[in-house]
Image (tube, rainbow, N blue to C red):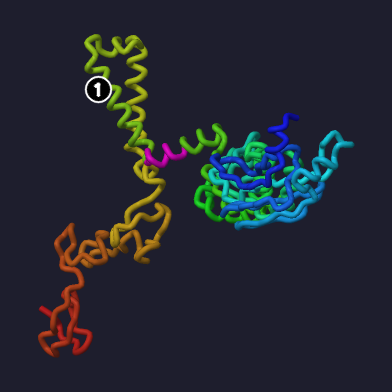
Amino acid sequence: MGLFKFIKSQFIEVIEWTDNTSDTMVYQFPVEGKEIKMGAQLTVRESQAAVFINEGKIADVFGPGRYILTTQNMPVLTKLKSWKYGFDSPFKAEVYFVNTKQFTDQKWGTTNPIMMRDSEFGMLRLRGYGNYSYRVTDPEKFMKEIFGSNSNFTTHKIGGQLRSLIVSGLTDLLGEAKIPALDLAMQYDELSEMTREKLDPKFNSYGFSMTSFYIENISLPEEVEKVMDKRTSMGVLGNLNQYTQYQSAEAIRDAAQNENGMAGAGVGFGAGAAIGNMMGQSLKNSEQNPTQQHNNKITCPHCNGQVSASAKFCSLCGKPLEEPKKKCSKCKAEISSSAKFCPQCGEPQNIKVSCDNCGAEISSNTKFCPECGNKRE
């Protein structure tokens, strides 16, 4: 060791750390030979904690502020007394700065699909991703459990462990919640909060605290998404017979615009005739089964509501779907019960008139008054 270097190493240290990174969790202050001198000045800033290790043990944890450290390393004197150790002091003292700010936008995602039992689709394999944030809340526990004696420590060194912890907890939570796969999207906030509460005690065992957790997306397998797309298409199309007619009309139009006619469509005359037959059959079936086009529904003549074709009374207004019939008083033809005149012979039906003798209200087709017996002319 040169004389100048020796003299420089005996000055009392001013220990501080200005963090210019976004992912450093622990920083060891560099001291020559790890021999912090008696009376060293320690400055700890906000969002920092300083762990003072004296002779291999954690002596104290300092929060924000200015402190004077006490060690057995006396400037010059201790160094001279260490000649039998090769001028290397046995009284080691170190300071580690621990970053206590929030480490935000930490990514998590499922490396392998999450197996889930769904009531509608059966067994599913789900994938998910999102982000979370955490901070160091117990520097001493963190130093003992995770950090060890490294010179520095970043979020990348613990990221894999935390992601595995998150995926395991979320998988367990999804299995317990038993939420249908199609309803997961509207439960993201609730699942995120439940996951944070579930995982926070496990983070605490490392000296951390999970401050936030977010699920950005939980995706279904490609096969399930295709089934959902088909169902959506069915719902958009609605009436399949009408859609078939529309497609048939479009095909006929395209064939008519082709200068070579139906043969120009690349199917030949025979294939063109077959297409025509299929189109005609589709239109015929559509006309023969009008009720099937509306899923076996008919329109109520009273309230215009859609009810089952097999119903006798409207489920919306309660009135009979078939109007009651009666027979004409003269020609006995079957007519509507509300008809005032017979459509066959013109005879008035149930028209009330007054008796010429007693004035009682009687039917127009009554020959004798039921009150006085007077014969009507």
> Where in the figure is residue 256, as x and y percent of width and height?
23, 18
* 236 drawn magenta: yes
Residue occupying the far front of the picture? 3
Residue appearing at x 41%, y 42% in the figure: 235
Please indicate, yes or no, whether residue 201 appears anywhere in the rendered image: no
Residue 342 higher or lower than 8, as above or below:
below
Q: Is residue 277 left or right of residue 341?
A: right
> Where in the figure is residue 45, as x and y percent of width and height?
58, 53
- CA neighbours of label 1 inside 10 A, class few (<14), some (14 to 19), many (20+): few
Which one is nearer the viewer's eye here, 20 or 330?
Answer: 20
Q: Quadrant of the C terminus?
A: bottom left
Please indicate, yes or no, whether residue 108 appears anywhere in the rendered image: yes
* 115 drawn magenta: no
Residue appearing at x 58%, y 55% in the figure: 193
Please state the extent of the stretch shown in magenta in the rendering: 231-238
Per the image, the residue denoted by label 1 is: 253
Residue occupying the far right of the picture? 84
Which one is nearer the viewer's eye here, 131 or 263?
Answer: 131
> Where in the figure is residue 345, as x and y percent of width and height?
16, 60
Q: Is residue 186 left or right of residue 134?
A: left
> Where in the figure is residue 253, as x and y percent of width and height?
24, 22
Q: Quadrant of the N terminus?
A: top right
Query: Given the image, on which type of amino acid does mark 1 rest?
Result: Arg
Q: Secondary structure at mark 1?
A: helix
